[in-house]
Image: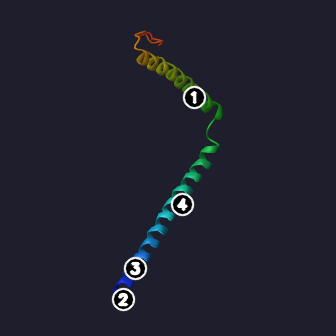
Amino acid sequence: MGASAWIALASLAFVIFVQAATIAFVLGGLFRDVKTLREQAGDGDCRKELAVLNARFAAMEELVKELGHDIKNLLTGTVTPARRVRATRE
């Protein structure tokens, strides 16, 4: 075998080694994540998390409405006050 064949075999071995190491690293991370999720499954209260998510969703929905209003004003060229609720400062 010539030098080019040895270089090709060494490159192939290197690529296989790198792929095996990468797969092992990714699988290790996945196993760690699954273990963490299993440990957290009994700790959390789903109702509290759902209430937080609902509040965030409602806030995002209001933001989208405001953005739609602002974009409409930009496209039409009209100047109208935004329908934002101003919080009172104490």
Tell me the residue that label 4 is attached to. Answer: 27
**Amino acid type, callout 4:** Leu
Residue 15 sits in which quadrant? Answer: bottom left
**Above or below: residue 1 compared with residue 54:** below
Q: CA distance from mark 4 to mark 1?
A: 32 Å
Give the number of the disc on residue 2.
2
- In the picture provided, is 8 more to the left or to the right than 24? left
Residue 44 sits in which quadrant? Answer: top right
Mark toward the start of the polypeptide (1 vs 2): 2
Q: CA distance from mark 1 to mark 2?
A: 67 Å
Q: CA distance from mark 4 to mark 3?
A: 28 Å
Tell me the residue that label 1 is attached to. Answer: 52
Q: Quadrant of the N terminus?
A: bottom left
**Above or below: residue 27 compared with residue 36:** below
Tell me the residue that label 3 is attached to. Answer: 8
**Amino acid type, callout 2:** Gly
Q: Does the residue at mark 4 contact the one at mark 3 (Cβ under 8 Å)?
A: no
